[in-house]
Image: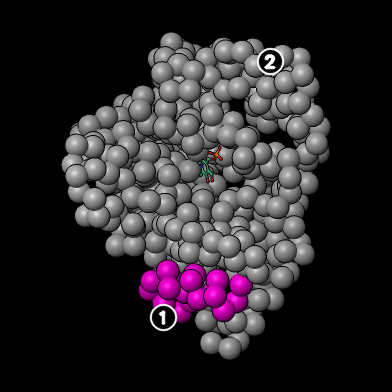
Amino acid sequence: MASPHSSDTAPEQRPELFDRLSHEAVHTPSSGIIGIRTYAAGRKDVVPLWVGEGCMPTPSFICEAASQALKDGETFYTHQRGIPELREAIASYHERLYGRPFSTERFFVTGSGMQAIQIAVRIVAGPGDEIVLPSPAWPNLGAAVQVASARPVEVPLTFSPEGWHLDLDKLFAACNERTKALFINSPSNPTGWVASADQIRAILDFARERDLWIIADEIYTRFYYGEDRATAPSFYEICEDDDKILFVNSMSKNWAMTGWRVGWLSAPPALGEIIGNLIQYSTSGVAPFMQRAAVAALNDGELFVTEQIERARIGRTKLLDAFQGHNSVKYAPPMGSFYFFFGLEGVTDALPMTRKLVDEAGVGLAPGFAFGQSGSAFMRLCFATDPDQMDSAIQRLTYWLSRR
Ligand SMILES: Cc1ncc(COP(=O)(O)O)c(C=O)c1O
């Protein structure tokens, strides 16, 4: 996962500070997404589409639920697995989405989707173990595996203008006796690739046969652009309650709550004590007033989620319309999530270009190397933003391209 662009240079600068630190702490690479933000720090004239969030603030009814809980004195230590009301709200949300009952006992509230990922990885893998994942992938997935002293094994998706494709034979061939889990992020950040229902079935069959865990990151499942169904195909549609699947999820994207840092992990209820322990020994639970906000979001936020999805849909259409005739731009229409992952013909390393785009076009994009070697030629643009911002970014990008 380490890349030539990661800023992994600190040990040389002050060796005496680093020589007694853990290998994982020192060698886990910095996020290339954060890197470009740092590069453009202080630039007010840049349209910031590098991170995975739009410009909508959290709806006020959600903020008010948190304020009310604070006023009500909800400032004490809390349930390590999450307050019962939130676990129930999460279970009901899944019931509405998948049309079947879910036990509240399988849901664990975490301090972000990222913490859910960390816990999931920690549960299944440790030193010497491997976790296989399709790439390009959100950098934090592989980094979480590295922090757990395990090894991420990337299986590159293949790019064609029709779409990114996962070759299941390659995915399965990457598994060996050290493999503990398959990490499947569908819809994918950054490519917009979506696993088909048949692929989901085949991956579950393979994992069952080989006794592997699946970590299913389906946080973008509502952002699906196929005509055939409302949400992306999910392991929830075919799995049994005690299948070895850990689902990670988040309040961040659907409800515009990226700064709140609340998410959840969904696991066979038998793992309750283990997961509760890992939460206890990290954060000891999520602040109760933030959990109240999450309850409000889940119970009363459906209209807002629909608007978020519509905003992303509009952004996607605008981009596809704008780039349709540009032969120098290579991309596959994203089928899910809310990222446009594109490159320019003849450019194999897009990092210098993302800097140029900041300096010359005033558009902030994430460089593809951040998502693994197979993404180096691409740049990621988040289109879950308001239409005016999208128009402005498209105008700047197309003008810049026309002068290249
Ligand atoms: C694929 C994927 N999983 C998980 C997350 C984690 O979200 P958060 O930590 O904001 O809850 C993100 C955030 O960008 C993501 O893109």
In this rendering, the label closer to the viewer, 2 or 1: 2
Which color mode does the image show?
one colour
* Residue most extreme to the bottom: 403
Q: Position of residue 292 (x, y in %)?
A: 70, 22
Question: Camera-side residue: 115 or 339?
Answer: 115
Density class for disc 2 (Cα within 10 Å; few <14, some 14-19, many ≥20) is: some
Q: Position of residue 319 (x, y in %)?
A: 66, 68
Q: Amino acid at mark 1?
A: Gly
Q: Which residue is mark 1?
A: 346
The answer to whether residue 122 shows anywhere in this view is yes
Q: Residue at x 54, y 61 (%)?
A: 41
The answer to whether residue 243 shows anywhere in this view is no
Q: Tell me which segment is drawn in magenta.
A: 344-362
Q: Position of residue 76 (x, y in %)?
A: 61, 13
Question: Camera-side residue: 287 or 384?
Answer: 287
Say whether residue 111 is magenta.
no
Question: In screen coordinates, is 350 left or right of 46?
Answer: left
Q: Amino acid at mark 2?
A: Glu
Residue 298 is tagged as none
Density class for disc 1 (Cα within 10 Å; few <14, some 14-19, many ≥20) is: few
Question: Camera-side residue: 130 or 39?
Answer: 39
Question: In screen coordinates, is 323 left or right of 240?
Answer: right
- Up the image or down, 231 lies above or below 383; here it is above
Task: Indicate the quadrant where residue 332 lies.
Answer: bottom right
Say whether residue 354 is magenta.
yes
Q: Residue at x 18, y 42 (%)?
A: 19
Residue 74 is tagged as 2
Task: Indicate the quadrant where residue 250 lies.
Answer: top right
Q: Earlier in the sequence, mark 2 or mark 1?
A: 2
Element at label 1: loop
